[in-house]
Amino acid sequence: MATAAPIFVFQIVSVIDLILLVFALIVQGVALVHAITQRGDAFPAIGTLPKGGWIAILAVCLVLTLLGFGALSIFGLIGIAAGLIYLLDVRVGLRDLHDGKGFW
């Protein structure tokens, strides 16, 4: 029975890599679309990077993740971190600045 494990271990690893890649692309894509659709003057009002800075960071990380570096590369991990920081911190600040109105 112990010899059966190495046969499918690579399939499990590839499925986990695919799940992480999809997660990374979704997080980075949603953060990038949200950053593009927001007003530029709202970013300095909440004390964060300007709109162009966030768009540049998120777009470069998304492109590098798509080019085949993958979600577990340094660029993929930085992209996931940047996307999550944007979604969990900056998006909330922007929403509070606009009185919580809107779909996002």
Image (spheres, rainbow, N blue to C red):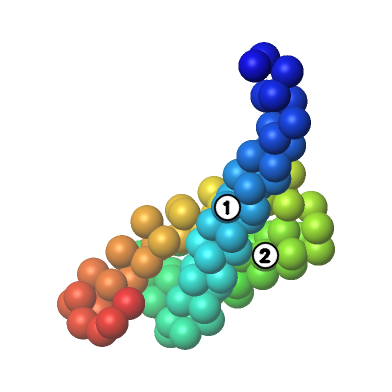
Q: Which residue is mark 2?
A: 62
Residue 13 in which image quadrant: top right
85 vs 72: above or below:
below
Number of disc labels: 2
Pick the residue in front: 89 or 3: 3
In the displayed image of the protein, which residue is found farthest to the top? 2
Q: Where in the figure is residue 94, as x and y percent of width and height?
A: 33, 71
Residue 92 in which image quadrant: bottom left
- Quadrant of the snapshot with the N terminus: top right
Q: Secondary structure at mark 1?
A: helix
Q: Which mark is residue 19?
A: 1
Q: Is residue 42 left or right of residue 55?
A: left
Pick the residue in front: 12 or 64: 12
Residue 43 in which image quadrant: bottom left
Q: Amino acid at mark 1?
A: Ile
Q: Is residue 98 left or right of residue 89?
A: left
Q: Is residue 57 left or right of residue 31?
A: right
Q: Choose the circle earlier in sequence order: 2 or 1.
A: 1
Q: Secondary structure at mark 2?
A: helix
Q: Where in the figure is residue 93, as x and y percent of width and height?
A: 31, 64
In the displayed image of the protein, which residue is found farthest to the front? 1
Please give the name of the residue rendered at 37% of the width and 56% of the height, measured from the top-left corner: 88
23 vs 33: above or below:
above
Q: Residues within 10 Å of mark 1 (few under 14, many from 20)?
A: few
Q: Amino acid at mark 2?
A: Leu
Q: Is residue 35 visible?
A: no
Please give the name of the residue rendered at 47% of the width and 54% of the height, measured from the top-left corner: 84
Q: Residues within 10 Å of mark 2 (few under 14, many from 20)?
A: many
Please give the name of the residue rendered at 68% of the width and 24% of the height, measured from the top-left corner: 5
Q: Where in the figure is residue 72, as x and y percent of width and height?
A: 68, 43
- Quadrant of the snapshot with the C terminus: bottom left
